[in-house]
């Protein structure tokens, strides 16, 4: 796959500042020159750039307007944007007001320029790799965390948590309330995992109501049981008094037929490398997905642990449910 382009935006086609050129060269990047807003957005929307450096030393208004446009688009707004400005506090303030992630004045020390641009890229990677709602690490960070544990030979448990009857809750109470429930689950997962396993725990958000958390193998039962207990304690209060007292409500299925919908529960599928050998994080996530799907066939909030051997099936799947 071709590398994402780096872009240098200069309305007057001025040459790259020497420090910016050195920074690009040191990272093996050859920036593409854009002179107009239309050129910039056409390129950015066609293939999101790795970085855009704006030259606002002479035509500040045009460069700042282009930066505003880049940052106001939901697709290109995550692109890290650096800006070189003319001397003065006003120019510095104008650059940041336009949405630039880093603004560099002429008096910025040479070594500091490279450091600031590097940090800008690291911040951008961090922001892209976290879920915007929960601020938990996303899929790339989850894969990396699993890979680190596999490479280190650690005994760990990968736990896939998913909500049951979440779609029906969204349909009844709105996506706004559904998003709030997702944040509640994220908070429970984070606090329990970090509280019981402050050194070895990791919590990631795949998306929607799907989460992966990694914990030392021996701590998995305690942590999963604590999550299940806290969730079941809190979830009834996310419903109206009438629904909470009844313990269910009537909702429509995909055919438009009314049926009884119970209160939400949480299902957790657990996979460990105690009896299995994994060579890639994808194998772990695939098996965790399988176990999560099995857990969702059971009633109530449960966690299920894969106790099969590799490669031949051994003892039955272990189930712990309240």
Image (tube, helix red, strand yellow):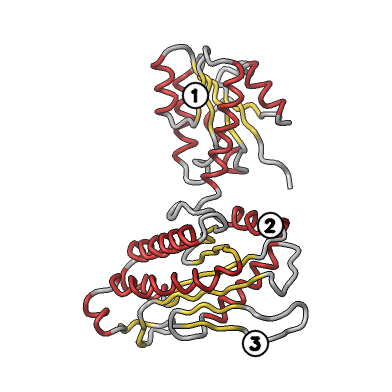
Residue at left offset 67%, top offset 54%: 148
Image mark for residue 137: none
**Vertical order, 253 against 212 (above or below):** below
Q: Quadrant of the C terminus?
A: bottom left
Q: Mark 1 packing: few (<14 Cα in 10 Å), some, or many (20+)?
A: many
Image label count: 3
Q: Residue 104 in the image: x percent, y percent?
A: 52, 20
Q: Are marks 1 and 2 in contact (CB under 8 Å)?
A: no
Which residue is labeled 3 in the image? 316
Residue 236 visible in the displayed image: yes
Q: Residue 119 in the image: x percent, y percent?
A: 56, 32
**Vertical order, 322 against 136 (above or below):** below
Report whether 319 appears left or right of 283.
left
Mark 1 or mark 2, earlier in chain: 1
Q: Residue 118 in the image: x percent, y percent?
A: 60, 31
Residue 39 visible in the displayed image: no
Q: Nearer the viewer, residue 303 or 132?
A: 303
Q: Nearer the viewer, mark 1 or mark 3?
A: 3
Q: Nearer the viewer, residue 250 or 66?
A: 250
Residue at left offset 43%, top offset 59%: 191
Q: Give the alpha-carbon distance from disc 3 to disc 2, as whole Å.
A: 27 Å
Residue at left offset 69%, top offset 72%: 274
**Vertical order, 307 against 7 (above or below):** below
Q: Residue 55 in the image: x percent, y percent?
A: 55, 21
Report whether 248 appears left or right of 124.
left
Residue at left offset 58%, top offset 21%: 113
Mark 3: secondary structure = loop
Mark 3 or mark 2, earlier in chain: 2
Image mark for residue 147: 2
Res. 98 image quadrant: top left
Q: Nearer the viewer, residue 235 or 20?
A: 235
């Amino acid at each position: 796959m071709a590398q994402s382009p780096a872009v240098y935006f200069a309305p007057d086609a001025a040459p790259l500042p020497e420090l910016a050129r050195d920074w690009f060269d040191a990272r093996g990047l050859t920036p593409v020159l854009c002179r107009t807003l239309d050129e910039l957005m056409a390129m950015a929307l066609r293939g999101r750039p790795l970085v855009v450096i704006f030259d606002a030393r002479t035509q500040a208004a045009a460069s700042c307007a282009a930066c505003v446009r880049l940052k106001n688009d939901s697709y290109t707004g995550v692109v890290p944007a650096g800006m070189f400005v003319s001397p003065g506090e006003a120019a510095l303030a104008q650059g940041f007001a336009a949405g630039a992630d880093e603004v560099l004045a002429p008096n910025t020390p040479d070594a500091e320029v490279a450091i600031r641009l590097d940090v800008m890229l690291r911040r951008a990677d961090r922001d892209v790799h976290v879920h915007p709602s929960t601020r938990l690490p996303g899929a790339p960070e989850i894969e990396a965390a699993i890979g680190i544990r596999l490479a280190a030979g650690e005994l760990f448990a990968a736990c896939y948590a998913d909500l049951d009857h979440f779609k029906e809750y969204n349909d009844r109470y709105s996506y706004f309330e559904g998003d709030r429930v997702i944040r509640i689950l994220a908070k429970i997962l984070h606090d329990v995992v970090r509280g019981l396993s402050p050194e070895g725990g990791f919590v990631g958000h795949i998306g929607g109501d799907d989460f992966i958390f990694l914990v030392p193998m021996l701590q998995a039962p305690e942590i999963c049981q604590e999550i299940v207990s806290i969730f079941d304690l809190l979830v009834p209060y996310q419903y109206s008094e009438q629904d909470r007292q009844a313990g269910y409500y009537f909702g429509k299925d995909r055919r438009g037929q009314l049926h009884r919908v119970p209160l939400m529960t949480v299902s957790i599928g657990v996979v460990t490398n105690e009896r299995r050998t994994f060579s890639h994080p994808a194998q772990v996530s695939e098996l965790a997905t399988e176990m999560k799907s099995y857990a969702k066939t059971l009633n109530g909030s449960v966690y299920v642990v894969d106790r099969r051997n590799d490669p031949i099936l051994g003892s039955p799947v272990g189930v712990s449910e309240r």
